[in-house]
Amino acid sequence: MWRTRAAAACVICRSLASSTYGIKRKSPLQNLHLVSRSIHHPYHPSLKFQRRPLRISLQQFSSLNRLPLRKTKLLNVKYGYQSYRNFWLARLASRLLKIRYLILGSAVGGGYTAKKTYDQWKDMMPDLDEYKWIIPDFIWELDEHIDLEKLIKALPDADDLAKLLPDFEKIGESFTSLKGIFSPGTPGETAFRATDQGYDGDKQYKKVSDKEKIDQLQEELLRTQLKYQRMLERLEKENKELRKLVLQRDDKGIHQRKLKKSLIDMYSEVLDILSDYDASYNTQDHLPRVVVVGDQSAGKTSVLEMIAQARIFPRGSGEMMTRSPVKVTLSEGPHHVALFKDSSREFDLTKEEDLAALRNEIEIRMRNSVKEGCTVSTETISLSVKGPGLQRMVLVDLPGVISTVTSGMAPDTKETIFSISKAYMQNPNAIILCIQDGSVDAERSIVTDLVSQMDPQGKRTIFVLTKVDLAEKNVASPSRIQQIIEGKLFPMKALGYFAVVTGKGNSSESIESIKEYEEEFFQNSKLLKTCMLKAHQVTTKNLSLAVSDCFWKMVRESVEQQADAFKATRFNLETEWKNNYPRLRELDRNELFEKAKNEILDEVISLTQVTPKHWEEILQKTLWERVSTHVIENIYLPAAQTMNSGTFNTTVDIKLKQWTDKQLPNKAVEVAWETLQEEFSRFMTEQKGKEHDDIFDKLKQAVKEETIKRHKWNERAEDSLRVIQHNALEDRSISDKQQWDAAIHFMEETLQSRLKDTESVIEDMVGPDWRKRWLYWIGRTKEQNIRNETKNELEKLIKCNEEHAAYLANDEVTTVRKNLEARGITVDPCLIKDTWHQIYRRYFLKTALNHCNLCRRGFYYYQRHFVDSELECNDIVLFWRIQRMLAITANTLRQQLTNTEVRRLEKNVKEVLEDFAEDNEKKVKLLTGKRVQLAEDLKKVREIQEKLEAFIEALHQEK
């Protein structure tokens, strides 16, 4: 029976050995157990125990295993023993039962010893199955981007690979020699010899110390990882070059196709819209981001720069540099460039001058975003970085957490930084990248407590220990670093723990030199050699892969849920709009601004439709209201006090010349500008029936005020106007009776208006007359009684001398005062003069009005220059000159308005509207109300939902 089983086993092994195998598989003979080989093939030369080859997770998940390899036929194996059997040996063995039992016992003992040795080796091997996630998904997708045919051609041919296989001819010869050894002996001796050889090999293997085994395994693991990483970098470099060529050809128009936006760019656009979405809904905070938090100067910025592969952030020695959140969108591209969301300029990150300009621009934007009296800002700066080999993700760099507010900082800086960090970390889908400085004591860290509060279970936290090179040099106990990495030193839990080196502390170091220094440090570090750190926990490369993988995993799990939330929000907003504004279009703030802009420009155009007659009437009337007081008080009244016509004309000419040179042109321009403002305001504010929308009132008022503030009348207008006015006032010739009558009418209206004002002043001084006192039961005050007595006394003086001068003499003042004192009334001389001014003014105006009536028939004498006539009408000529000057001035100003100033005003209105259009804060302030806010929310939610749906569709297509 035993012979039959042995023969069957030999037949099976021969069939296995004669088949064709791939390159990586072992020969079937080697796959058998050691004892099986000794039993079934006593002539097999490999009887000593062989060390099991090391298999790690990197071999299981290597991208090279997925490459299609050529099948190669192995050489036919010729075994070096005869196919005939030694029947006499079998007969002898069957008779010796004791030897059979010894052989079976030795085989069982040898098998147990071999199994025990195998189990010891298996226990010594580290379990690497938990770290399969280190290898990112894109490794398995390399065959989609790499030219496999080119790679296959680079591999060795089948002949070269066959040389690496064992020489089966020599193995056959060994079988023949083993047959010669076993032939003279017995089966029992053969079994004992095989068992003794396995036992001696086991003893020799156990001589190696455990420490040396661990060191050898660790070194082999590091070498394998470095070899794999270099191979991966080489493949990535080739892939970058190929993708670069494709994109460059597309740019030149060789392939006329439109490149789609990458997934990360689409996702970043959604986050940008969400950052501007300011409504009562908080769903925008539930989309994943990588939030980078850490203590000040812990190395946050350096970690981000290593991930972005460029020194893009401003740097300072101990000074707070990150003053506002910076959202960095990393994506793959043919060129290493950076650009801001609101700018089209691209910064070439391979050029030092562009890097310096980018750092300066980021610093300027940060300082501009900080309000006066503050140190940090909540305003987010959006930056996109593209380059070959960058991991796709969205990171937000936050200001470093501080423990003490120093001089120069706002008192609430610490609380503001805490609130900003909590606002980003409280998002349940945010990945927290917690940065801890390894060169300082862990007890001094503040950020770990903050992260523990926001993520107690550590389900979305990745812990990063920076400056490990300094930590290994300065820390007395290296196990303390291991405790930090494993999260045993403080209660903070994390999804993963990493250790990185971000340079030697020199700000001028390049990214490449830092990467080389980091690889060299970890290759020689005791932390890895002593197994305090594991290979997948070191280098920023591994950190970047892990963070990217975790980020996309979180995105895939949460994005559809957020899209459903925005869909429900959109339905609620649309329902609210239909119920409140069923007859209005959904216009957001920008659309409403454009509508208001068109209305305002139409109203400005309406100024050109004002008739010339309307302009001149308004200008003439307004100008006379402004200058009439000066003409009456400073020109006409002083000249009228003279004794003859020659003196009157001389006085009038002098005063008119002075007035024209100094005040009149300036006053006329002011009147014209105010008239233009009033007409502009009238068109802007008047309601247009049912079409009027009061939502634009604040905007129109602001545009009107800003335009008026900016508009300035042409400075040369005053010079030309002065000449025109001077010439008009020099003309004394009245050509016809109609102009004469018009001048008399103008003079009468002016004097009557002044007389009415004067009587009103006198009434206020002396109180109501006896009729009002009896009808309205109003009495006079004591002062009014004194004024009334003084008035009566002064009127007696005028009746006695109708040609009295305009001023009282001192003796006349004394006489009036003594007459009043005789009646028991004490009066101050100033009161007497003040009352006399109004009494004489009324008397003079009445006399001038009587003179106007006399001059109605004086045009005949005027034509004869008042020769042989006692009638003198020089005051009529004066008012005709004034009237003609007003008409000519109004005509000149009207021409300037319609030809120049209205157009300039329209240009200023357009500039103001353009400035307002670029100022979002101004638009929010001027266009307010429930209707505007509801339309804004509806537009944002629709846009976000559409972007999310497009992103989800692209995500499914990528899968």
Image (cartoon, rainbow, N blue to C red):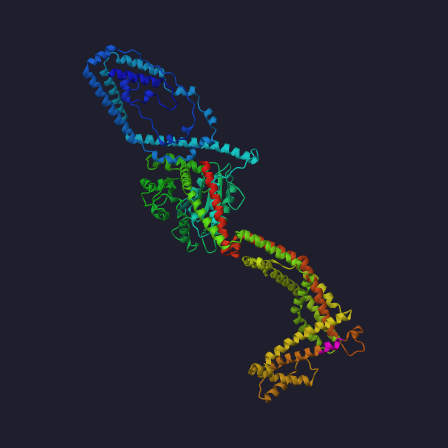
Residue 72 is situated, as x and y percent measured from the top left of the image, at: 41, 20
Q: Is residue 852 magenta?
A: yes
| Relative height, residue 157 to residue 87 (above, below) | below
Residue found farthest to the top: 88
Above or below, 929 against 298 in this view is below
Q: At which x and y percent is residue 207?
A: 27, 27
Residue 503 on image: x %, y %: 42, 40
How far across and how far down the image is residue 322, in percent?
A: 45, 48
Left or right of 8, for residue 256? right
Q: Nearer the viewer, residue 294 or 569?
A: 569
**Most extreme residue toward the bottom, as rendered?**
822
The answer to whether any part of residue 774 appears in the image is: yes
Q: Is residue 926 magenta?
A: no
> Which quadrant is the N terminus positioned in?
top left
Q: Is residue 380 left or right of residue 810?
A: left
Indicate the quadrant containing the C terminus: top left, top right, bottom left or bottom right: top left
Q: Magenta segment, principal secondary structure?
A: helix
Number of numbered markers: 0
Q: Which residues are magenta?
A: 850-856
- Name the outermost residue toward the left: 98
Judging depth in this view, the residue of 69 and 486 nearest the camera is 69
Q: Which residue occupies 35% across, 22% down?
A: 26
Residue 931 vertical placement versus 235 (above, below): below
Q: Is residue 588 above or below residue 181?
A: below
Does any portion of residue 511 appear in the rendered image? no
